[in-house]
Image (spheres, helix red, strand yellow):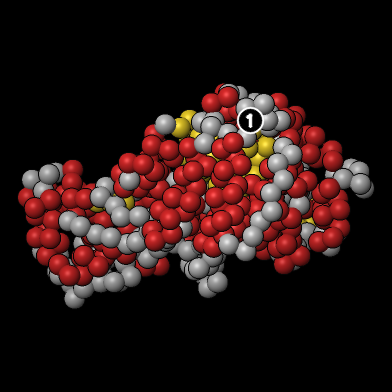
Amino acid sequence: MKDNDSIKEFNSEDYSELFELMFSDLRRLSKGDKETFIDLYYNRDDDITDFKMVAKNLSETGSNVIIIGDAGVGKSSFIYRLYYDSALLEELKLFPIIIDYRDFQEEGDQFFFKQTVIQKTKEYLDFIGVKITLSECQNSNLHLVQKEIMDTSHEKKKHLIIFVDDLDYAEQRELFPILKFLKPFARSQNVSIVLSVRPTLYKTIQRNDGTFSYYFTQHVRKIELRHLSLHHIIAMRLAPVLAITNIEHKGFLKNIIYKLSMLKSEERKYIRVLKKLGVKNLEDLKKIQFPFTEEYIAFMKNITSNNIRECFNIAIESLMYILDHYEKLENDIDSETEEVRKKITNKMIVDLFTKEYSKYTLFDLHEIKNINNNSLYFNTLEAVQKCRKGNLDVNFYKSLEKLGHKEEDVKNALKLLGRKSNRFLSSNDFTYAQDYTKEPIKYRVTKKGEYYLSDISEWPEYKDKFDSTNPSKSLKSIIEEMI
């Protein structure tokens, strides 16, 4: 940071807690600090409008709602945003309760999930003036609340809406028992279930049981969450810390200026937070140019398959790195706004995300090489991509064998590359909640896998780090010969 031709030295550790707050999981914030949750929430105006449209007649129809979105797209944040919108719920005459499966994720905690549903349903019955006494028997209590819910008059004060979040974390042995437990609520005209799921779970319910699909995925109102602009989410989170004022997007400029003005008052939320965290030289910190170029944002999205939580981990580490190396960063000038921003180069990316204790690391496609110095993971990804395109699935293993890879090793590579933690491959023939593999024809390369093959593996800095001695041979020439 240059100030009168001098460079301000920052200790990034002083800001680590601040960045953790700015990019924290909103699900955690929603329970601990409603104000901060609302401040940091990126407004999904279109999606909230969609919810209003599907929910406006719930009190008459008792329909159920399913919210579909990829991992990290912001389903939990959206659910809690609806749950906290008292004005919206009042307008729709809804009485909300929220059940978060992640709170009951430990093995054997299905009991406590059910117990919580029963207890919160009793609170609704108390609200509408139906008094019941719960016993020690969970099944008896379940039948009791279900009976009272079913018998409730349509002249009720408010319609019960049950938000069920993070059911994706249920193992397969837990998923269907929980759906069975929820089914009587789902079929009641006096209750609406709002289920938030990833596409995989949606398809699992669709294909595994006709009864469950009828109530939870078919005869329901659907909301598919759009992917948000990662650039604007990050800018929104950093606006109270950095002097960002020139991002125009659907009233975004006004929002950022307002949030910056909040810092002027000692009574405002961010001032209190900053003081609590011991951040004293905020004015110096504001001199940092917004450090995330469009290219770096694209890297963050592609490397995480658009998972916002993982992008936030990258943002935190990047900001820590920027404070420690600010004077070494190159300048990048935006072609449209002529804004000067600091640029993180590919070499810095490789250094940053291969260091020890990194929260998010680059995957080493060349980690395992055979006696011919050919990389197992790299070549397996190539084969899935190129064999499928060339209709050469029958020659999948033969083509890899020409590079020295054994069939057993390739099958193990398929399993590893398809795991949720890696997400390089996805299977069209899946079994939920477990790693599962069939023939290579069932696999396709994900966007993340494509990005590694077409971009990252070609970076000279990546090759120097992982493939510098005896570089791996590509499968491309072999495939072309076979075609």
**Depicted 333 relative to depicted 400: above or below:** above
Type of residue at label 1? Answer: Ser
Judging depth in this view, the residue of 157 and 396 nearest the camera is 157
Tell me where residue 106 appears, x and y as whole percent.
53, 67
Judging depth in this view, the residue of 321 and 340 nearest the camera is 321
Judging depth in this view, the residue of 372 and 239 nearest the camera is 239
Name the residue: 21% across, 70% down: 409
Tell me where residue 435 appears, x and y as whole percent.
32, 62
Tell me where residue 87 appears, x and y as whole percent.
74, 30
- Looking at the rendered image, the quarter that the N terminus falls into is bottom right
Residue to which mark 1 is pinned: 153
Name the residue: 62% across, 55% down: 116
Q: Residue furthest right?
A: 266
Q: Is residue 253 visible?
A: no
Tell me where residue 425 appears, x and y as whole percent.
31, 53
Element assignment for label 1: loop
